[in-house]
Image (tube, rainbow, N blue to C red):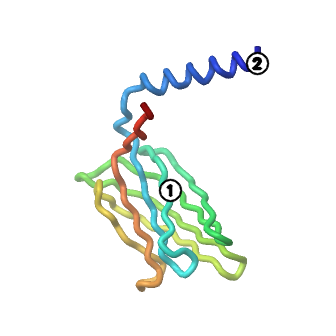
Amino acid sequence: MRDRRFFLLAVMLSVMACGAPPDAESFDLEITLNTPFNHDFTMLTTVRIGQPFELTATNGAVTNRVSGTLRAPASGAYPLDLTVSEWASEKSNLRDTTKLTLELGKTSGFGPVSSFLYVRQVTLRRHEPHLKPK
C-alpha cells in the first residue's frame, strides 16, 4: 500500500510539473568564482524577483556560500544584492557584499580586490526548464 501511495504521489507531481505554465519571473543565475580559493568554480541556481536565495557548495576544502535578492528591472537591468563567502578556514576566507546591475545574457565581473587574482562573474538568463526525456 505504501509503495502505491508513493507511486501515485510521484505521478501527481509529474503531471502538475508538466502542466504548469512557464514562469516568466524565474531566472537562472550563474556565479563563477576565480580566486585563490576557487579556480573557475561555477554555481548555478534559479532565482525569482524579490525572493531571497542562498546557495552553498563545496569545492575541496572550501565552502562557498552565495546569497542575495534579485530586484525588479529598472531600465531593462536587474539590480542584484549579492553576498559571496569563500571559507577554507578561520584564517583563510573571503566574504564581501556588492550591488550589481545585471542585463540578461551579459556577464558582469566583480571582486573584493581590483586584481586578476580575485574575479567573480555573474550571468543572469531567463529560466529554461530542462528538456524532458522522451
Q: Mark 2 points at which residue?
A: 2
The outermost residue toward the left is: 75
The outermost residue toward the top is: 1
Residue occupying image coordinates x 42% and y 54%: 29
Q: In which quarter of the image is residue 58?
A: bottom right
Question: Is label 1 or label 2 in front?
Answer: 2
Q: Nearer the viewer, residue 106 or 72?
A: 106
Lower position in the chain sequence, tag 1 or tag 2: 2
Residue occupying image coordinates x 52% and y 64%: 83
**128 lies left or right of 76:** right
Residue at disc 1, secondary structure = strand
**Label 1 neighbourhood size at 10 Å, few (<14), some (14-19), many (20+)?**
many
Spatial CA distance of label 1 from label 2 is 40 Å
Residue at disc 2, secondary structure = helix
Q: Quadrant of the C terminus?
A: top left
Q: Quadrant of the N terminus?
A: top right
**Where's residue 40, x and y in %?**
47, 72
Task: Identify the amino acid type marked 1.
Answer: Gly
Task: Identify the amino acid type marked 2.
Answer: Arg
**Where's residue 9, x and y in %?**
63, 21
Q: Nearer the viewer, residue 31 or 52?
A: 31
**Where's residue 88, x and y in %?**
67, 75
Residue occupying image coordinates x 63% and y 77%: 93
Question: Compared with residue 22, is residue 87 higher up or lower down, i.e. above or below?
Answer: below
Residue occupying image coordinates x 34% and y 46%: 126
In the image, which disc is placed on residue 68? 1
